[in-house]
Amino acid sequence: MASPGIDVVDVRRAFGAVDAVRGVSLTAAPGRVTGLVGPNGAGKTTLLLMLASLLRPDAGSIRIAGIDPVADPAGARRVLGWMPDALGAWPALTARETVAVSARLYGMTRSDAADRAAALLGHVGLADLADAPARVLSRGQKQRLGLARALVHDPQVLLLDEPASGLDPQARIDLRLLLRGFAAAGRTVLVSSHVLAELEELVDDAVFVVAGRSVTEPATGAERVRAWRVRTAGDPPSAVSVAAALGLRPDDVGRDRDAFLVGFAGDDAAARGLRALLDAGLAVVEYAPAVGRLEQAFLDLGRASGGDA
Amino acid sequence: MNAGRLWTIVTLELTQRVRSVAWYVLLGVFAAILLGVTALSFLAFSWMSAFGTGAGGAIYSVIVYVVLLLVVLVSPTVAGNAVNGDRDQATLAPVQVTLATTGEIVLGKLIAAWISGLAFVAVAVPFLAVATIAGGLSPAALVVSLLVLVVEIGVFAAIGVGLSALVARPLFSIASTYLVVAAFVIGTLIVFGLAGAATRTEVSSHSRYLNYDAAGREDSCTAWEEYTYAVPRFDRVWWVLAANPFVIIADATPTAYDRQGNPTDLFGQIASGVRMAQVPPEADTWSDGCQGGPESYPSVREQTDGLLPSWFVGLGVQLLVAVLLMWGGWARTRTPARTLPPGTRVA
């Protein structure tokens, strides 16, 4: 049965003696935004190149909306949109021409390509710069141009390599809305990044890649202790009073500038902690996980794999 | 192979060139050079009208040679980084990920480089027209030489595009394109000269002269004198020159002769020279100064009659090299890529 998403089973790829990808399996479901998380050099870009039908895997199988990009690259290219991390733009072409040329390369007629370029540039917020040469665009604007180019043939599967790097907060929000809308239309989005805070706000699911291998997300169960950041109004109280309110030893309460860091095992424990702090009369104005969900998972991952070694 | 996508790639390449100022400067400089060359040619060949032939043919051949020379010098830089330059700019992968096939990409780049080279021919058109008006040019010479020029420009473009796909770094692919082109243009000359001179054979010449007495009357004949010396055997290596682009154009163009049987243009002179290299030196030559008047030498036309034209062999060798390089470049650029040129990224 052909799944409309991405299915990767034990894909490997080496460059000479360097094993870039040493066994990645992942599934990206349609209707969801899947994050590809891993440190620099983990093999994310190599994996995306294989998914984009540009690089042949040494082993393993890839299905993009049910199509094998090795056996049928043209078929896969018809359904996938790819936005590379290194964004090259033809220096002499305007933004409009850049998108229109890509549309023409997907076989659209001249007038269809022009219409599509105008619509997409509006969609990614580059309508004002449509006739500016691509080389004068800022990095963030080039990212958007790359996104427009990836969307030009209305793909079912979108592969984005570090799409949010270089984007300002407003552009990040725009990107999130755009990808959400894309996923809501039943399509598949795979986004890679090493900036976890950036991915956090974007993705539904996450796939972790460490040293060329995909690893299952560590259980984010109740038993795992997470640090929460507690800030109170006015002058900070002593750590002792915070610890007392929570029934902890003062050594268990960390300081982060004007805030405290407290570990809770799971959301329920954190909720009880907040109640205890309020009951003790502390004017809590900020109460949130100190690190993002993905970041925490990623850090746990490093700790787990470090422990194994 | 889809014509629409192929043409999109061609126009994409050409648009970027057309929008660079440097390109127009280059064409302007070229026009200025041609103007000078044409003016000088008119001065240089003005004597020909005295022999009943217009100077047009000679001027025409000089202009075609200047165009070819310029294309030889420029096309490696135009075509020699077509594929790897795009890879460096990260503009190759976004094309590869579309429905454009590898064949369309490399062929589109070849056609674009070819058309760029033809821009030099286009600039030369007014000058070629002036030469045609000056007269003395046969229609066959005009058609054939232009046709071969166009094919040669395509061969250089193919060598450049092929190497740009095979070699990872633009600098080295441009340099290697220059080397391959130089191998045809200069290398063939060097091999011809050196190999001919290295394979000398001994020939002897016998001669005797009239003796004159003190009053200046013919007196008696000297005895036969024999000289033995070594001559280079260009007849064994003449075929090396066949792959030279300048020789190919000259050799392919039907030669026009004047009333004395001498070629009237540069093409004819070079073609005759190359063909006469096919003639082996005579092992024994006899020159009798005591008999009759001055010897009558056969005209160039008579000497070259029946000697082999070789241009199609040379052009065939060039086309083979061009096709092999293009094929290699295509294989190297294919996606999904199995191997990458060392030190490069797909994107």
Image (cartoon, helix red, strand yellow):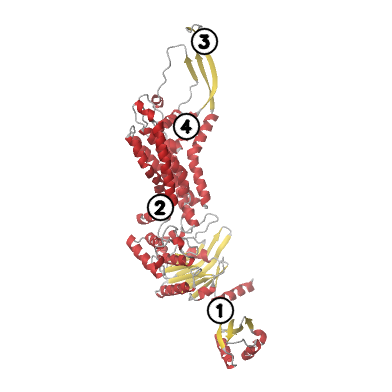
Question: Does the residue at mark 3 contact the one at mark 4 (Cβ under 8 Å)?
Answer: no
* Labels 3 and 4 share a subunit: yes
Residue under numbered circle 2:
B18
Q: Disc 4 is attached to a residue of which chain?
A: B
**Which amino acid type is marked by label 2?**
Val
> Residue A202 vs residue A211: left or right?
left
- Residue A219 badge: 1
Residue A9: x %, y % from top left: 50, 68
SS type, badge 1: loop
User: Which residue is drawn at the image coordinates 45% and 71% (left, top)?
Assistant: A189
Position of the N terminus of chain A, as image quadrant, is bottom left
Q: Disc 1 is attached to a residue of which chain?
A: A
Give the distance between the C-alpha atoms of the residues marked 3 and 1, in whole angstroms: 116 Å
SS type, badge 3: loop
Which mark's residue is nearer the viewer, 3 or 4?
3
* Labels 1 and 2 share a subunit: no
Residue under numbered circle 3:
B222
Q: Which sits in the foreground, B277 or A242? A: A242
